[in-house]
Image (tube, rainbow, N blue to C red):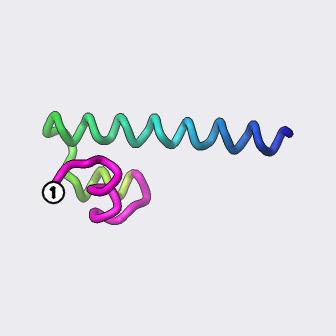
Amino acid sequence: MCKMMEDMRNNAEKAGVIKTLIELVRDGILSFAEAAKRANMTVDEFEKVSGLKA
């Protein structure tokens, strides 16, 4: 049960980070490449997750 809770917390944390990165890209503060790098994704993966176009 503890492992399951830890995984849920980690997934929620990662989702929050990605949401923040998407907002920073929308606001023009970060480039797609930088946001993808910070999310440990490729630019193509980040595009798919964000729904935005590089």
Q: Could you tell me how many numbered marks the image carries?
A: 1
Q: Position of residue 33 (x, y in %)?
A: 24, 59
- The image quarter containing residue 42 is bottom left
Please state the extent of the stretch shown in magenta in the rendering. 39-54
Give me the residue at 30% from left, 50% from top: 35
Residue at which label 1 appears: 54
Does the magenta-highlighted stretch encompass residue 41? Answer: yes
Disc 1: CA contacts within 10 A as few (<14), some (14-19) or many (>=20): few
- Please state which of residues 52 and 25 is positioned toward the viewer in this rendering: 52
Q: Is residue 33 left or right of residue 37?
A: left
Give me the residue at 47% from left, 40% from top: 15
Q: Position of residue 41 (x, y in %)?
A: 39, 61
In this view, 39 is above or below 9: below
Q: Position of residue 30 (x, y in %)?
A: 21, 44
Q: Position of residue 2 (x, y in %)?
A: 84, 39
Task: Indicate the secondary structure of the residue bearing disc 1.
Answer: loop
Does the magenta-highlighted stretch encompass residue 49? Answer: yes
Residue type highlighted by circle 1: Ala
Q: Is residue 4 left or right of residue 11?
A: right
Q: Is residue 12 left or right of residue 51?
A: right
Q: Residue furthest right?
A: 1
In this view, 38 is above or below 27: below
Give me the residue at 15% from left, 57% from top: 54
- The image quarter containing residue 1 is top right
Give me the residue at 51% from left, 43% from top: 14
